[in-house]
Structures are given as structure tokens and as C-alpha cells.
Amino acid sequence: MDISLDRIKNALISAAVVGAIALLLIAPAHYAESVSKGISLWAVGVLPATLPFLFLTAIFADLKLFGRLSRAVSPLSRRVFRVSGTGACVALLSVVSGYPVGARTIGDLAQDGRLKKEECFRVACLATTSGPAFLVGAVGCGMYARPWIGWILWLAHLFGVFSVSALLFRRAKPPKADALLAKPADTSSALSGAVLSVLFVGGAIAIFYAFGQMVSDLTAPLALPPIADGTLRGLIEMTAGCGAMAQIGSPLAVGLTAFFVTFGGSCVLMQQLVFLRRANVKTLPFLGVKLLQGIVAGAAALLLAKFLL
């Protein structure tokens, strides 16, 4: 019997939703606590680092300085990554600020016409990265209690993203030269957009943190080893997976942490795809590239950790 992929997908989604509702009804206090932990994680580790960058990058992208910088880096970015200088500057903002700054900025610039339609996918693969505030501060210093592990993770993460993007798109036709465009900075719109974006991120973290706890509870009778349980949680909510790997602390755990951060897990991927939808970025190709970037980043972090741990 021929069963379409859409029917299978709808059946799986329906089963997951009904199962999650059932678990919430069976143990409401238990999963309310998981949601609270997710909110606390967002409030302590994500909100302070993300909100200022979301506000400032929205203003910066409208300044003449952003346009001048885009034109300055355009020859190199067109040659190496086949993206405009504007796209390269978005990638730089993402490297410094972390997600979801890159994805949100891509959506804004695509709607303004400052990112060409043909390059939006390439920029999305290049400019959806984590920043040092999370990897060095929250993961290295906080979870692992060893800052140098955070730097290893950040370097491996960037290596995975940039190397895969450069290789995959080396034959793509580069976009035309950047136009020097700017408009008056609207601080009120930038602030309201930043607040709404960071609230969306917080909601996603809280919900997916609870989903990760549900999966962990359902697999508890299987007595999975800690690294397998942590992997399942990381594929759902990246931060929870990083915390689980930090408890293990082996070179393989460091490699898996780099994979989670680069691939993103369901929570981060959903945040990014919501913003990237405005740039018409296709979901499946994007997921495929992020998966490949995650594998490369994980392998690089594993090799570095084996020499240093």
C-alpha cells in the first residue's frame, strides 16, 4: 500500500502531540518544574547576552557604517563563500552575538532587499552560529568549569560552519557588488523587535526543555547510558544536551557538545527557521547543511579534546 510521506509525517506529529498532552495530564507538576527550569535557563544564560545584541544589531544594520563595511569585505566574501559583503557582515554579527541574531538579521535584510534572493540560503548556512558568550561563558566556564573547553568548542564550531559553507558553495555564482544603502535608525522598532524575538526564544527553550525531559522519562526503563540519554536531550534542546555532556566530561562528550551547538537541536533550529522563513530559506536543505556542519565541528572538537584532556 502506498503511503505518502505527508501522511507519515502527520501521523508522527499527531502521536507526539497526543503523547505530550497525556504526559502533561499525568504529571503536571513534574513537567511544570521542567518548564520553570527552561525559563530559568533562558533568564540567566540567554536573555542577558541576547537582548542587547538583538537591539544593537538591528540598529547597526541600518547604519552607513554597515554598508561601508559590507563593500570593504565584499571581494573576499564573494570569492570564498560566494556571498555578498552584506551577507558576510551578517555572519560576523552572528559570530560575535550568537543565534538567533544572524537568522533574525537575514530575515530583516531579505525583506528590505539588501540580501539577494539567490544568496539567502548560503548566508543562512554561514550566519547561524553561536557566540563566545554562550560557548565560553555558559558552557566552558559554567557547565564544564574549564574556560579553555569553551574556546575549543567555539573554534571547532566556527571551523565546521565556515569550512563546510566554503566547500559546498565554491561553484555557486557570487552575487553582484553591494549597494551602499542605509536608512534612519528606528530605535523604538529595534527595541520592540528585540524584545519580541527574545521572548519567542525564551518560550521555545522552556517548551523544548520540557520535551527533552519527557523523552528522558520515556526512555528511563531502557537504562540508556548517560551519553545516549544526553544525546537524545541535546537533539531536542541543545542547552540541556550540553549540560548533560559536561557531566560526563570525556573527549567524546566535548565532541558531541560541539555537534549540538553547531547543528542546533530541534529548539534552536525551530527558532532559526521561523526567522529564515521571511528569506524563503528551504527547511530540508538547510537542515542537511547544518547536520554536515555539526559533524565536522564535532569531529574537530573531539580531536582537540583528545590531545588536551
Image: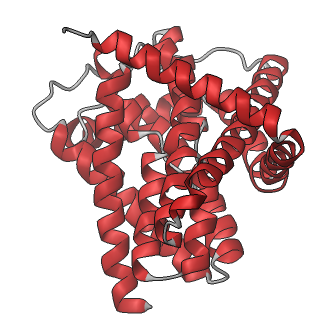
- Location of residue 256 (image quadrant): bottom left
Location of the C terminus by quadrant is bottom left
| Residue depicted at 76% across the width and 23% down the height | 190
- Location of residue 189 (image quadrant): top right
Q: Residue furthest right?
A: 29
Location of the N terminus by quadrant is top left
Counting from the top left corner in percent of width and height, residue 278 is at: 51, 13
Q: Is residue 133 left or right of residue 169?
A: right
- Location of residue 290 (image quadrant): top left
Q: Is residue 93 left or right of residue 26?
A: left
Q: Nearer the viewer, residue 215 or 58?
A: 215
**Compared to 257, does 63 lie above or below?**
above
Counting from the top left corner in percent of width and height, residue 138 is at: 69, 65
**Compared to 246, does 44 lie above or below?**
above
Colouring convention used in this rendered image of the protein: secondary structure
Is residue 71 visible in the rendered image? The answer is: no
Counting from the top left corner in percent of width and height, residue 23 is at: 73, 36
Q: Is residue 35 left or right of residue 144?
A: right
